[in-house]
Image (cartoon, rainbow, N blue to C red):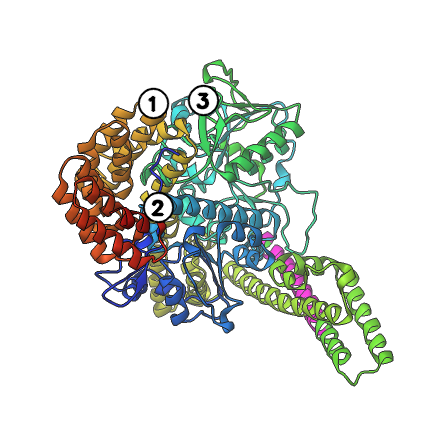
């Protein structure tokens, strides 16, 4: 690695607040403000959260873990500290016995052995985890921390994605329960209806901007399937997609995708069964659902499935099932642009600027260049390749040269595409979808209520059976139980298990799938041969505790769905209390349902319940105006949660760590792109300016241009030159014989960091500034009298300038610190 290596020293300092710390790790950050005050500001709120997995890189010389021990660990939380080997060897931290199951300290190798695990996986599955950097790790002077932090982030992200892909996400089922009232017509109504036709799938990648004019000009000849986040952009451009697709279950999906609401009268919404209920519940237009309507119907091959991992994958799969013979892709880039952008103009992401902080991997584009991508998009590429392979009769083309190359999908220039007028306009497509009358919706809601009623009865039975099994297990555990009685109880438990898993098989499968985190406690790392009766009994207890606990959770979801269906039925009635409906819409953040209600009750003022009641008429008018205004606010509020997530990944701290990794890997391509992208931002942002000089200088080093690399670093404003840049200036200056530049860098470094004082003194000696050099050595040794190496250096220096008495004094000091030091003894004997 070209970057000047750090030097973690064993010397401890004591701050004026009587806190011991390693200056080589924490510099002087605890000299002006004590650690507790700083930690209260940075960590207190997060560290106080219950049921969280907190992963922290760095210990701050042990002060951070001591702070945590003093604060106490919240109920259900686990804290993992990962520290550099060189630092751990210098620390001696005693973890209290009562915290040994909740507080762990590892080096990187130890961390990778224990992570992931079932225990930590539960936190990650629930999204109950957070990553932090200690103050020392946040500081930029130790490149090892940047590299370590990047590795930890990658481990966390990979495990999070793995849990999302391989485990049942409870959020998906929760949204499916909420969507039962809206998921009425299946997407299979579109199956094989468009054989021989061409479809354009439009996603939100930057290449969409290159083709937007072509799409507008040819919109009459295209059948357009658009992902939900860019539907609003298309609408503004005068383009009406035939179909809008959305799959994301999270609440902020509404804010990100709300532009599609303008197309409710002109486009068909095709949604996954688990799409955000805020989005689907406020959609006033026609919609079709993919997969299953009911969560306990886990297999239904009749409907079109939702294939991930992204909405683009789901859209392409939908297009294949609709029968299209040619599928064109635009905005399906699956990688970053050269300038670091991931999304089309005017999107939330692009308005925040290029995201240069994500540490991805390189893929090849159709133009033959290298572009960066992230893990999820890599999975999306693999899934698209699988889709193309599974449909060899369909021709797939990507319309962007800058998109990531995917097996089975070829590049095609838009000028080469020959289009015929489309047989279906968006309005004609909508006419193919049955119009649901109030009576149709009423019957569907009543059917769903009966289905859920049966589910509630089944869950109630399973809870009772689980309680019976647990009671039988307790009896077996009783020391007074006879062997014969225990065998009888084991048989009874087996009968219960058979009844649950055979009589209620579909619901039992739902319980196990939805309750994966709870059933993880049932899993064991012991080999079958090591199972003793006590261990097997505990597994049985864990198993039925999970059944009971998860069944109760699902019971709440089922009851919530029943309440929603009851309100949906009320929405269809002329006699329902509007104010009660408005209150429920507010509770669910479904204020947009007012438009659906108004569509069904255009003549509401003539209803007999309010026609001759002026007070009620006035109250209804006020309620409708208020709820309509609230919905308009929903359509304009910025998606703060999502914006904060994007901003965090694009932070300059992350950019710095990425540069450090690129330097470590001698990644010339990455450094060129990074320097190029930072150059413009650097004009307005000082943090970016510093990082531009750092990246560009190391790019030049890889091009064997050492002199130019030094010039670039020296050109950085003095107040922006951190320890990293100053160390590199010193290293390059010495290599190039530029003593003055090296002295400049070391003088700046030694102003606040004692460990550089001896090096500064040595440079002054080389420059012939002997007294200044001696003064620096003495100042340093006055503070660190135990530093034998520097006493020896000072003694040798005194000999060189013919000061034997001073030399002898220096060697005697060395012997005071290390009485058996052979070098000092030899010098004294010679003197």
Q: Are marks 3 and 2 in contact (CB under 8 Å)?
A: no
**In the rendering, which numbered label is found on residue 369?**
3
- Asked which secondary structure carries label 2, the reply is loop
Q: Earlier in the sequence, mark 3 or mark 2?
A: 2
| Residue at which label 2 appears | 7
Secondary structure mostly seen in magenta is helix
- Front residue of 191/829: it is 829
The CA distance from mark 1 to mark 2 is 25 Å
Q: Quadrant of residue 496?
A: bottom right
Asked whether the viewer can see residue 269, the reply is: yes
Answer few, some or many: residues within 10 Å of disc 2's Cα (few below 14, many 20 plus, some between 14 and 19): few
For label 3, the SS is loop
Q: What is the C-alpha distance between the residues marked 3 and 2? A: 38 Å
> Magenta segment: does it hold 453?
yes
Identify the residue under disc 1.
704
Residue 499, label in figure: none
Query: Which residue range is magenta in the image?
Result: 440-464
Position in image of residue 181 (x %, y %): 56, 56
Q: Which is in the foreground here, disc 1 or disc 3? A: 1
């Amino acid at each position: 690695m070209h970057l000047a290596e750090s030097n973690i020293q064993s010397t401890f300092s004591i701050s004026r607040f009587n806190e011991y710390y390693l200056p080589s790790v924490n510099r002087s950050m605890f000299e002006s403000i004590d650690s507790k005050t700083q930690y209260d500001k940075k960590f207190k709120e997060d560290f106080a959260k219950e049921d969280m997995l907190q992963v922290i890189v760095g210990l701050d010389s042990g002060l951070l873990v001591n702070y945590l021990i003093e604060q106490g660990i919240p109920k259900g939380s686990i804290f993992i500290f990962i520290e550099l080997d060189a630092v751990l060897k210098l620390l001696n931290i005693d973890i209290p016995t009562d915290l040994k199951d909740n507080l762990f300290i590892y080096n990187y190798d130890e961390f990778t052995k224990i992570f992931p695990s079932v225990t930590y996986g539960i936190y990650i599955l629930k999204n109950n985890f957070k990553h932090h950097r200690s103050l020392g790790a946040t500081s930029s002077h130790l490149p090892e921390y940047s590299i370590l932090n990047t590795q930890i982030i990658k481990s966390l992200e990979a495990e999070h994605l793995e849990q999302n892909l391989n485990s049942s996400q409870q959020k998906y089922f929760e949204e499916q329960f909420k969507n039962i009232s809206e998921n009425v017509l299946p997407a299979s109504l579109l199956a094989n209806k468009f054989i021989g036709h061409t479809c354009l799938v439009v996603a939100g990648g930057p290449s969409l901007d290159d083709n937007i004019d072509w799409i507008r000009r040819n919109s009459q000849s295209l059948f357009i399937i658009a992902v939900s986040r860019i539907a609003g952009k298309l609408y503004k451009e005068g383009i009406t997609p035939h179909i809008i697709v959305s799959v994301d279950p999270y609440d902020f999906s509404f804010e990100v995708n709300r532009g599609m609401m303008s197309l409710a009268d002109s486009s068909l919404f095709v949604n996954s069964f688990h799409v955000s209920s805020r989005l689907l519940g406020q959609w006033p237009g026609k919609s079709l659902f993919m997969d299953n309507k009911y969560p306990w119907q886990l297999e239904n091959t009749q409907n079109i499935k939702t294939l991930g991992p992204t909405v683009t994958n789901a859209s392409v799969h939908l297009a294949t099932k609709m029968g299209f013979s040619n599928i064109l892709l635009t905005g399906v880039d699956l990688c970053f642009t050269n300038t670091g952008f991931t999304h089309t103009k005017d999107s939330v992401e692009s308005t925040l600027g290029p995201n240069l902080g994500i540490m991805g991997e390189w893929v090849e584009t159709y133009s033959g260049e290298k572009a960066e991508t992230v893990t999820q998009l890599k999975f999306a590429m693999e899934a698209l390749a699988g889709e193309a392979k599974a449909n060899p009769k369909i021709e797939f083309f990507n319309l962007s040269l800058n998109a990531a190359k995917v097996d089975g999908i070829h590049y095609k220039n838009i000028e080469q595409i020959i289009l015929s007028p489309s047989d279906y306009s968006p309005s004609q497509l909508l006419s193919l979808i049955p119009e649901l009358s109030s009576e149709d919706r009423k019957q569907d809601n009543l059917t769903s209520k009966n289905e859920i009623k049966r589910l509630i009865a089944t869950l109630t039975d399973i809870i009772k059976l689980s309680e019976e099994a647990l009671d039988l297990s307790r009896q077996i555990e009783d020391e007074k139980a006879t062997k014969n009685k225990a065998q009888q109880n084991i048989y009874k438990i087996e009968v219960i298990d058979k009844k649950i898993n055979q009589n209620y098989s579909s619901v039992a499968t739902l319980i196990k799938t939805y309750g994966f985190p709870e059933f993880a406690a049932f899993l064991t790392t012991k080999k079958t041969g090591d199972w003793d009766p006590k261990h097997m009994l505990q597994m049985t207890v864990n198993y039925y505790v999970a059944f009971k606990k998860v069944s109760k959770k699902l019971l709440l979801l089922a009851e919530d769905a029943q309440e929603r269906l009851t309100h949906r039925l009320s929405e269809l009635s002329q006699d329902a209390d509007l104010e009660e409906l408005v209150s429920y819409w507010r509770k669910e953040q479904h204020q947009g349902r007012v438009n659906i209600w108004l569509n069904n009750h255009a003549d509401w003022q003539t209803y007999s319940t309010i026609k001759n009641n002026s007070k009620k008429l006035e109250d209804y008018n006020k309620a409708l105006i208020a709820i309509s205004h609230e919905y308009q606010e929903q359509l304009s509020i910025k998606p703060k949660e999502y914006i904060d997530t994007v901003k965090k990944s694009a932070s300059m701290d992350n950019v710095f760590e990425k540069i450090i990794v690129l330097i470590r890997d001698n990644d010339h391509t990455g450094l060129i792109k990074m320097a190029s992208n930072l150059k413009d931002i650097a004009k307005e942002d000082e943090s970016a300016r510093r990082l531009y000089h750092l990246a560009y200088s190391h790019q030049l080093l890889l091009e064997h241009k050492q002199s130019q690399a030094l010039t670039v670093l020296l050109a950085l404003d003095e107040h922006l030159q951190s320890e990293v840049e100053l160390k590199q200036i010193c290293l390059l200056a010495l290599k190039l014989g530029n003593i003055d530049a090296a002295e400049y860098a070391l003088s700046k470094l030694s102003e606040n960091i004692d460990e550089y004082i001896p090096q500064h003194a040595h440079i002054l000696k080389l420059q012939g500034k002997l007294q200044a050099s001696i003064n620096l050595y003495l100042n340093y040794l006055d503070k660190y009298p135990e530093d034998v190496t520097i006493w020896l250096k000072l003694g040798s220096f005194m000999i060189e300038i013919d000061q034997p008495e001073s030399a002898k004094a220096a060697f005697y000091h060395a012997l005071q610190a290390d009485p058996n030091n052979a070098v000092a003894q030899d010098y004294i004997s010679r003197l």
